[in-house]
């Protein structure tokens, strides 16, 4: 048996989730015997780390490729830890790490979220190893495991903490970032705009909650059959890098016109916004405009976030670009149509019909195949917990450090039959 130790391991972290998760992870890795550094790109990164092993990057984005290669060599790094793999600074780091044979560890929001976090090696979302694994391969690997199929939770457990840390992070950049003159956000908005969006959303939560409940009630008591469209954040890397659309408006146009062409006239279409939608995209007005142009304005609805389960329980089908929320659609055995690259896009349970035909008579998924796929995720990359609440971080850290120190990645360990026992308890909010 290989001892679980960090001796001889040298970790470098780049940007992580807002808040203290990376700092707490680094502390545990050090206690296991590893050496840990973090490169920070702004005052927000610095505030949530501390002084030990912190390396400020004060250069420009253009200088970054040469700098990350030099730092990997100077520190003799063996392992690189990232939150997401598509933003420029992370993509360049992954490229340099692969050229040097450095192990790349990637965190992401859970594919089965909420209540889960994704941990993979090499790539996530459209770059994940899941993209090339078939359901029969997963089934063969699961023959040696007994996994309880946990219900898909109906609500988020740390949304307020998530928003709070976002506000605090951008406030520090806004007010105390003079040292990091070369910092450039990975999104289109500047720091002031990001801060104001987070602050506006935090303050508008009570009003939006009332609006959401009223809109949801209109759908639930309307008495009409409806289909659900799951929206994403337009700036999210999974949408930008692994979908055929460059803007959310393009998806809205395709969805509404496909619905107008194929759906029975008494059916309705409900658009549900992402829980973290902050108003940078004018979804409501765009939906109303396209619905008028397509002649279906009385049959289109918009709901600002909220609990997905309440809407899914009565929907006929769902469409999305590549939202992870689609996992809850499949868990219920509902027909699903996707447009972008997604780790759950398997022919056994995702429709291949043209959109108009899908709205007219959607094909149902192979529920048994999806449940085997979900079991595989629970035995591999999906960890109970979260990045933002204290309880969620504790739950996550109990398992993930051992997985990082393991010689095998989560998928390889299960496929080889050598995976250690996993904890499948649901996080207690």
Image (tube, rainbow, N blue to C red):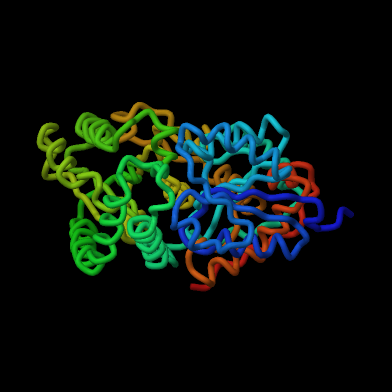
Image-quadrant location for residue 1: bottom right
Looking at the picture, does residue 347 appear above or below residue 372?
above
Q: Position of residue 364 (x, y in %)?
A: 44, 40
Specify whether residue 374 is in view: no
Looking at the picture, does residue 16 appear above or below residue 155?
above
The residue that appears at 55% across and 32% down in the rendered structure is 65
Q: Is residue 13 left or right of residue 280?
A: right
Residue extending farthest front? 179
Image-quadrant location for residue 33: bottom right
Q: Position of residue 85 (x, y in %)?
A: 53, 40
Residue extending farthest right? 1
Identify which residue, 68 or 358, lies in the foreground: 68
User: How many marks can you see?
Assistant: 0
Identify which residue, 404 or 97, lies in the foreground: 97
Q: Position of residue 160 (x, y in %)?
A: 37, 67
Identify which residue, 267 or 237, lies in the foreground: 237
Q: Is residue 373 left or right of residue 140?
A: left
Image-quadrant location for residue 129: top right
Q: Is residue 128 left or right of residue 223?
A: right
Looking at the picture, does residue 334 appear above or below residue 307?
above
Q: Position of residue 382 (x, y in %)?
A: 59, 53
The residue that appears at 44% across and 33% down in the rendered structure is 241
Specify whether residue 196 is in view: yes
Looking at the picture, does residue 420 appear above or below residue 89?
below
């Amino acid at each position: 048996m290989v001892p679980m130790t960090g001796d001889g391991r040298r970790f470098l972290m780049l940007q992580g989730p807002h808040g203290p998760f990376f700092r707490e992870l680094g502390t545990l890795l050090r206690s296991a015997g590893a050496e840990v550094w973090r490169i920070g790109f702004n005052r927000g990164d610095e505030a949530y780390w501390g002084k030990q092993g912190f390396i400020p990057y004060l250069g420009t984005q253009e200088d970054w490729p040469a700098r990350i290669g030099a730092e990997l060599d100077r520190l003799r790094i063996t392992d690189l830890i990232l939150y997401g793999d598509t933003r420029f600074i992370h993509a360049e780091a992954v490229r340099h790490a692969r050229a040097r044979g450095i192990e790349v560890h990637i965190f992401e929001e859970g594919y089965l979220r909420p209540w889960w976090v994704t941990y993979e090696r090499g790539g996530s979302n459209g770059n994940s190893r899941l993209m090339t694994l078939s359901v029969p391969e997963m089934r063969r690997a699961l023959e040696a495991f007994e996994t309880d199929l946990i219900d898909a939770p109906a609500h988020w457990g740390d949304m307020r903490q998530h928003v709070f840390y976002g506000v605090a992070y951008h406030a520090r950049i806004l007010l105390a970032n003079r040292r990091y003159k070369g910092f450039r956000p990975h999104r289109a908005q500047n720091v002031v705009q990001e801060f104001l969006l987070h602050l506006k959303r935090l303050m508008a939560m009570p009003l939006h909650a009332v609006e959401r409940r009223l809109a949801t009630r209109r759908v639930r008591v309307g008495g009409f059959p409806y289909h659900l469209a799951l929206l994403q954040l337009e700036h999210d890397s999974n949408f930008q890098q692994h979908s055929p659309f460059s803007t959310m408006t393009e998806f809205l146009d395709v969805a509404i016109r496909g619905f107008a062409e194929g759906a029975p006239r008494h059916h309705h279409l409900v658009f549900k916004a992402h829980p973290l939608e902050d108003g940078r995209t004018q979804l409501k007005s765009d939906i109303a405009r396209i619905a008028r142009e397509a002649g279906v304005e009385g049959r289109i609805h918009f709901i600002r976030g909220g609990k997905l389960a309440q809407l899914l329980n009565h929907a006929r089908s769902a469409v999305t670009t590549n939202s992870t929320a689609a996992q809850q659609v499949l868990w219920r055995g509902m027909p699903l149509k996707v447009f972008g690259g997604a780790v759950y896009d398997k022919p056994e349970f995702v429709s291949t019909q043209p959109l108009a035909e899908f709205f007219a008579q959607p094909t149902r998924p192979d529920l048994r195949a999806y449940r085997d796929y979900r079991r595989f995720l629970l035995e591999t990359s999906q960890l109970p917990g979260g990045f933002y609440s204290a309880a969620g971080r504790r739950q996550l850290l109990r398992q993930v450090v051992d997985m990082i120190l393991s010689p095998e990645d989560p998928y390889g360990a299960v496929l080889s039959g050598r995976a250690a026992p996993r904890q499948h308890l649901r996080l207690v909010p």
